[in-house]
Amino acid sequence: MQDKLSELIMNAEALVSSGYYGQGARHYEGASLSRSLTTHATFPVIAEIKLASPSMGRLSTYGPRKLIDDYVRGGAAALSVLTEPRFFHGSLKNLELGRQSGLPMLMKDVVINEDQVRAASLHGAGAVLLIQEVFDHAISPGRRDDLIDCAHNWGLEVVLEATSEEGLNKARDSEADLLGINQRDLRTLKVDLTKAMAFLPLLSEEDRPIIVMSGIGSRAVIEGIRDHGGDAVLVGGHLSSAKDAEETLRALEVPR
């Protein structure tokens, strides 16, 4: 039986081949994600425009513009913008909408090709997400360090996420600007809420910002991540599926 990560990688290859990431756009210099996470007044929440997911289907009854407005009013430190159209109902146009907010943007996708990195920069993202387990996968055509160099050449910061201790150790041996702990297993899509607490102590000597992702939906969870050395959280489904995303985001606010 094919795992979900294989399906996501093959879908990314098909999208690249179709020319999806070659859509024309002028270059916009995106705001710095790491600077925002470092200087934000409260513990930083990266709020995600996540209209659908492979595990839960359609999440939001609102469009991306409404979510962006709610996130700005709710105090987001930055936006995570999903651009993959098939499984996540994302769009490169959502980066252009997000750019108008003035918040730093992370382009989130299954990135395997320089065309995707270029698209992130052209559409106004300040950072691009790379996934360690994608590059470790047997069918992946992408080379991690080449894509990191490509991102830096386009003026982008790189968030390199991992979902396992092995992947995290590999991610540390990179020139990524920020590291991410994803509590979701991308092969099965199951979330393990113990991952952050188990992995954060392993990163205690890191001077790069550490972002925890997936399964975050309460102030208590965020306080625990903060107290164990995390520098920010990325919240997707909990916000996108909320009836009132602004108030739901405000309810996650905790001091630094």
Image (cartoon, rainbow, N blue to C red):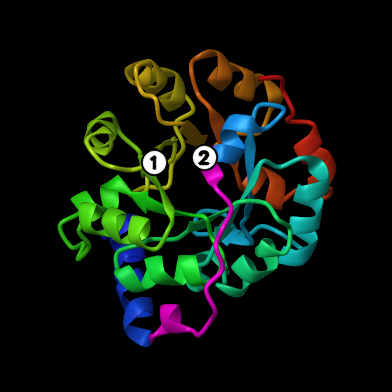
- Quadrant housing residue 217: top right
Q: Quadrant of the C terminus?
A: top right
Main SS category, magenta section: loop
User: Along the horizontal axis of the image, is 194 left or right of 244?
Assistant: left
Q: Residue at (27%, 38%) from the top-left corner?
A: 171
Mark 1 lies on residue: 177
Instruction: Determine contact: label 1, label 2, CB under 8 Å.
Output: yes
In the image, is residue 60 above or below residue 93? Answer: above
Mark 2 lies on residue: 34
Q: Residue at (27%, 56%) from the top-left corner?
A: 149
Q: Residue at (30%, 74%) from the top-left corner?
A: 13
- Quadrant housing residue 182: top left
**Is residue 192 visible to us here?**
yes
Q: Is residue 157 magenta?
A: no
Residue 122 lies, in percent from the top left, at: 50, 72
Check disc 2 and give the amino acid type: Ser
In the image, is residue 253 above or below residue 49? Answer: above
Residues in magenta?
19-34
Q: Quadrant of the N terminus?
A: bottom left
Check disc 1 and give the amino acid type: Asp
